[in-house]
């Protein structure tokens, strides 16, 4: 019998040896593969003596293929670091990975991988061979045996998973599917029952009250459809709904009307159950009195609504937007309805209840949240594990509304939940849902042709999704809106042309292509925005000025990275004499007016990674860290108590998700092959700007960024 010594050292003597053969290899990926490989090897070796001849030959074949599964484990670990929840075997089958001609790291890229004659890297076997190999590995569970076998690796539909991420996916998929299928309000067709017809009429009446022009628009072309009204109507009869759209499409405006509609629907349900059918919204003139009577009746219980966002800044912006929308609706929607819409949002972690130094939350499947409606904003930032934990903590009857821009960068951690749930192009509405929307909104055609309808007449995964098409902020004529649209569609030449001085749109003060050295264009921007920050008398004024401008970069390191850019801004301000300079002081000296960003969570203090504040002197002259809170006030904390933080004149594009600024200066790296560049990254940076966008980039780097697309691998699609 062959005596196999199965350890990773039989392939590579050490990590240094492996990294000399595999370009971009990261230590954590190597040691992950080494540990699993050793466990698997010992298992196979120790069991060979007890095997029958056929089984023994099979195990010896597995041992002889150790290089294949060892490198697959490296690729799996690398794919998880890149945010994929799984590794599709087709992505590596028959291809060379870890060579400088195919990748800059050990990650699984969307770029085509071709077999070359390079000596570095590793060439994987064909798909069939890899599939058979993984099916036979003892530490790999097949999909149908996951619960029984409890193995660390799972193979499902030729996708390789770490067990925990496979379970996150399956659990979230099942929880969402159950919520989609519950459909307590079966009002898709007026022909179902008399009760369904009554509810359908109520929904139609509410929608027409909130969107009085819908009926007059039903004969207009597709481009003129009021998708805000459609979004409200589409979400009203579902326990799971997604409203997606780019900046300025009115997501918060729409969802505020949706919350008002759900409150009005709850009032109508209360009336119908206690007094029989009564029309809540016969006339706009008696709408308020009807709502007042119902909302104050003994039988009415106001729905418990929670507003949440992934970060403190995003929660603050959601609070401000909801508050402004509610105030704008005063006079057109009954005060008794609007008063039941909460205006204070909180972070997801605060909602779930953080337990310090633990990964679990206070609310979970055994201690569920007491809410009827949950609105989650900026969903593109929410990763797979967190979204699963949210759904675990929800009662089966809670209505979930997801709000976000699916074109933005996905979460920093594993998963792209919003993109998986709301893929582009839209999956189409089922005939049943299309009929419901036609009855409620009056629009008889919501698609350009009948082929856009889902194949299943009764159900489509697209039924829960509405895309808001029209941007009110970027009307299509301004430069920021146009360049964002070109970039996300991968239209490099059109987007670059907009930045040229000869282009009319480049002269509308929305778009500027920065030229010259960084110091050349950065100095006047620092003088315009950050110099005044150091001269403010009140912290309120300083925060308002800080919100006007930000420098964004795709990287932390290098001349165009945030660390260098922040240091350069500090040097400019010191040369202006507005912040202290002492050659004996360290570069970490703190000073009043210094903008800071928290980089570690501190649940006891209530400050989280990504929170932005200012160092400011209090009334006693002590230097304090000040943070805006969601109640419209400020939290003052001694700097010595803060977790790790950094200066934030410049910040990475990833960190700006959930924030907006009047003017953004986006700085891209000099290397066109930077693996962080993508159209989603550029789009996210572009859409942080409300009024002005300045871009520092070469043409080749811009082309590289627009040409690359982020597509995370997962099996989360709901069907």
Image (cartoon, rainbow, N blue to C red):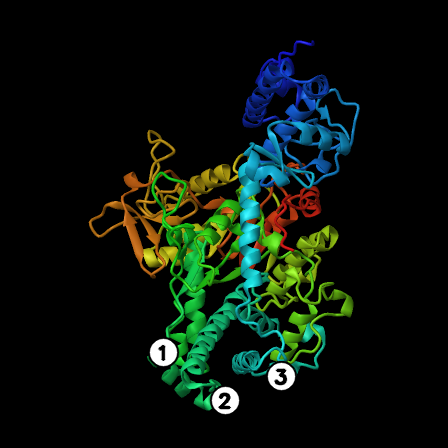
Residue farthest to the left, as pictured: 620
Which tag is nearer the camera, tag 2 or tag 3? 2
In this picture, residue 388 sits left or right of residue 349:
right
Q: In which quarter of the image is residue 126?
A: top right
The first of marks 1 and 3 along the sequence is 3
SS at circle 1: loop
**Percent from the top left, x then y, of residue 359?**
41, 41
Q: List the residue tagged with mark 3.
A: 215
**Percent from the top left, x then y, of residue 311?**
44, 51
Q: Tell me if residue 637 comes above or below residue 337 in the rendering.
A: above
Name the foreground residue: 458 vs 306. 458
SS at circle 3: helix
Residue 299 marker: 1
Does the image show residue 577?
Answer: yes
Q: Distance between the residues labelled 1 and 3?
A: 33 Å
Q: Tell me if residue 242 comes above or below residue 434 in the rendering.
A: above
Q: List the residue tagged with mark 2.
A: 282
Name the foreground residue: 538 vs 114. 114
SS at circle 2: loop
């Amino acid at each position: 019998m062959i005596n196999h010594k199965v350890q990773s050292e039989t392939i590579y003597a050490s990590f240094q040896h492996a990294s000399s053969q595999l370009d971009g290899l990261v230590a954590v990926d190597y040691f992950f593969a080494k540990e699993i490989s050793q466990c698997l090897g010992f298992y196979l070796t120790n069991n060979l003596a007890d095997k029958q001849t056929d089984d023994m030959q099979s195990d010896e074949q597995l041992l002889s293929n150790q290089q294949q599964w060892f490198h697959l484990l490296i690729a799996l670990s690398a794919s998880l670091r890149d945010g994929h929840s799984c590794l599709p075997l087709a992505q590596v089958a028959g291809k060379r990975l870890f060579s400088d001609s195919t990748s800059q790291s050990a990650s699984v890229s969307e770029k085509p991988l071709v077999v070359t004659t390079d000596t570095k890297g590793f060439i994987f076997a064909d798909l069939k061979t890899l599939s058979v190999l993984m099916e036979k590995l003892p530490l790999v569970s097949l999909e149908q045996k996951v619960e029984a076998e409890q193995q660390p690796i799972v193979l499902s539909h030729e996708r390789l998973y770490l067990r925990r991420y496979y379970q996150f996916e399956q659990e979230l998929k099942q929880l969402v599917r159950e919520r989609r299928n519950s459909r307590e309000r079966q009002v898709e067709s007026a022909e179902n029952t008399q009760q369904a017809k009554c509810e359908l009429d109520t929904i139609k009446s509410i929608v027409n009250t909130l969107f009085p022009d819908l009926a007059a628009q039903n004969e207009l072309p597709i481009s003129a459809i009021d998708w805000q009204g459609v979004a409200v109507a589409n979400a009203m009869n579902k326990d799971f709904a997604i409203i997606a759209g780019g900046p300025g499409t009115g997501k918060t405006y729409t969802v505020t009307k949706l919350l008002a509609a759900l409150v009005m629907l709850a009032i109508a349900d209360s009336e119908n159950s206690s007094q029989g059918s009564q029309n809540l919204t016969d006339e706009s003139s008696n709408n308020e009195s009807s709502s007042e009577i119902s909302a104050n009746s003994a039988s009415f219980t106001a729905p418990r609504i929670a507003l949440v966002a992934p970060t403190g800044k995003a929660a603050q912006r959601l609070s401000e937007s909801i508050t402004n929308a509610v105030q704008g609706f005063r006079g057109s929607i009954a005060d008794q309805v609007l008063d039941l819409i909460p205006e204070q949002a909180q972070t997801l972690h605060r909602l779930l209840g953080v337990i310090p130094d633990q990964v679990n939350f206070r609310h979970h499947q055994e201690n569920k949240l007491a809410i009827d409606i949950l609105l989650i904003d900026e969903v593109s930032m929410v990763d797979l594990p967190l979204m699963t934990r949210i759904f675990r903590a929800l009662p089966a009857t809670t209505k979930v509304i997801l709000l976000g821009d699916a074109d933005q960068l996905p979460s920093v951690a594993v998963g792209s939940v919003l993109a998986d749930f709301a893929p582009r192009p839209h999956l189409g509405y089922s005939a049943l849902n299309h009929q419901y929307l036609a009855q409620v909104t009056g629009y008889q055609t919501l698609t350009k042709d009948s082929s856009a309808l889902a194949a299943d007449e009764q159900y489509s995964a697209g039924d829960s999704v509405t895309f808001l098409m029209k941007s009110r902020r970027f009307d299509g004529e301004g430069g920021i809106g146009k360049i964002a649209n070109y970039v996300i569609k991968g239209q490099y030449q059109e987007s670059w042309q907009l930045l040229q001085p000869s282009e009319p749109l480049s002269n509308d003060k929305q778009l500027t292509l920065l030229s010259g050295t960084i110091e050349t264009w950065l100095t006047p921007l620092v003088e315009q925005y950050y110099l005044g920050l150091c001269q403010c008398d009140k912290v309120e004024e300083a925060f308002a000025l800080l919100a006007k401008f930000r420098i964004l970069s795709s990287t932390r390191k290098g001349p165009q990275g945030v660390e260098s850019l922040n240091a350069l801004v500090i040097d400019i301000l010191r040369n202006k004499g507005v912040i202290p300079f002492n050659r004996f002081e360290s570069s970490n000296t703190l000073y009043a007016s210094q903008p800071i960003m928290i980089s570690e969570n501190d649940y006891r203090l209530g400050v989280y990674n990504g929170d932005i504040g200012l160092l400011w002197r209090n009334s006693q002259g002590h230097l304090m860290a000040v943070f805006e809170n969601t109640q419209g006030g400020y939290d003052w904390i001694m700097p010595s108590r803060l977790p790790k933080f950094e200066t934030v004149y410049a910040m990475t594009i990833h960190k700006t998700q959930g924030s907006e600024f009047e003017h953004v200066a986006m700085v891209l790296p000099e290397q066109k092959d930077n693996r962080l560049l993508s159209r989603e990254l550029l789009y996210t940076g572009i859409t942080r700007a409300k009024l002005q966008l300045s871009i520092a980039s070469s043409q080749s780097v811009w082309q590289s960024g627009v040409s690359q697309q982020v597509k995370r691998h997962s099996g989360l699609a709901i069907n």
